[in-house]
Image (cartoon, grey):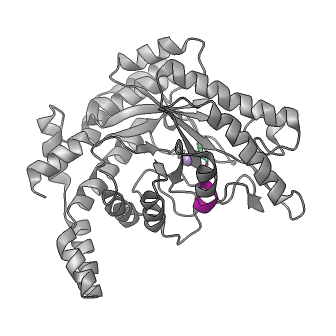
Amino acid sequence: MINDELKEKVKSFKVEIPSWGFSDSGTRFKVFHIPGAARNIFERIEDAEQVQKYTKAVSAVAIHIPWDKVDDWKALKKFAEDKELKIGAVNPNLFQDEDYKFGSLTNLDDKKRSKAIDHVLECIEIMKSVNSKILSLWLPDGTDYPGQGDFAKRQELLIDSLKKIYSALEKNMTLLIEYKFFEPAFYHTDTADWGIAYALSKDLGDKAKVIIDLGHHAQGTNIEYIVSILSSRGKLGGFHFNSRKYADDDLTVGSVNLYELFLIFVELNKFFDLSSKKLALVIDQSAAMKPKVQAMIQSVEALQIAYLKSLLVDVKSLKEAQLKNDIVMAEEIIKDAFLTDVRDILKESREEMGLDPDALNAFRKSGYESTVAKKRG
Ligand code: PSV
Ligand code: MN
């Protein structure tokens, strides 16, 4: 692909950023305060606006309920739109209420299970108010000890709950089912992997798909293969991008495993034109230590770079090498694309959009962080 085409592709490539990535977060050991970290959804959107201002690569801001709950959803939508932003995926929270100690959508207690279902239905109503089309569902449900629960019974309850949720979706809405193989439950998780999420989405119908979070796999899992399997069956609905070293670390995208990220994009290109919005490409990061807006700009840039590099794969030569079983040449073709420096292309594309070519540095120099640190305390 020639440079001009690459620039047009990356200009149209947009990613959703998470409201929760702008607030203080931490581990079970400590939540450290970052000066100026956003304290409510309005400040989170103000921070998101900064990412948009310097990258023009933000499609929307994903929200988490009740963390981002407001009285007037139309006003929130307008607040975002005034900042060139939309409200994106709505994420129900089924993991922080005492009632969900023994499960949310799988709870044996009818009342507690209904409460969980009602919370998700409330999120669908919020989607209607803010014109969001994506319901992004992650469940903490699982057990800690053998014997604690009946796997099959829990699946039965889960499918039943999901059917109630699914039937409330409007025609153009999509339910994304997110899997995770551990945490907070450690013996078994009800939606442990892509296979279970796939089966559930098949049971439900066309409006249900699977979302892949890069932090939710065992070490060594070949995520790009999962991308291929789900995409070829029409069931890949989106991503939660982040980076991990050990588990669900939620580090900045591309900070540890750039090659994996690139290989995921190589696979995605076979099924989707990522410069048009068919997939919910969402960042899900909330690592504790970095200044939040800077971390988000880094992540957006890591995605843009991985995308650009993936477009450089010489697909024709790769096919020829595969036909000849020339393993070495096939691998070299992939590596050649990965090792090409595309940063100048990204910079030029930013300049053509009237932006500073160095988004991160321009933001760092802007004084925004010290202003909000004073304002927000
Ligand atoms: C769970 O680990 C998860 O990836 C889900 O997407 C949640 O909504 C999100 O993290 C909360 O940070
Ligand atoms: Mn996630």
| Image quadrant in which you'd find residue 194 | bottom right
Question: Compared with residue 98, is residue 262 higher up or lower down, i.e. above or below?
Answer: below
Question: Compared with residue 304, is residue 341 higher up or lower down, i.e. above or below?
Answer: below
Could you tell me residue 89's position as x and y percent? 50, 34
What residue is at 29 percent from the left and 50 percent from the top? 273
Of residues 365 and 159, the one drawn nearer to the viewer in this rendering: 159
Residue 194 forms part of the magenta stretch: yes
| Image quadrant in which you'd find residue 268 | bottom left
Read off the magenta span. Answer: 193-197
Residue 186 appearing in the image: no
What residue is at 57 percent from the left and 22 percent from the top? 126
Question: Looking at the figure, which quarter contains the N terminus?
Answer: bottom left
Answer with left or right where residue 167 lies relative to residue 213.
right
Could you tell me residue 257's position as x and y percent? 42, 63
Of residues 109 and 159, the one drawn nearer to the viewer in this rendering: 159
Answer with left or right where residue 99 lies relative to residue 267.
right
What residue is at 59 percent from the left and 17 percent from the top? 70
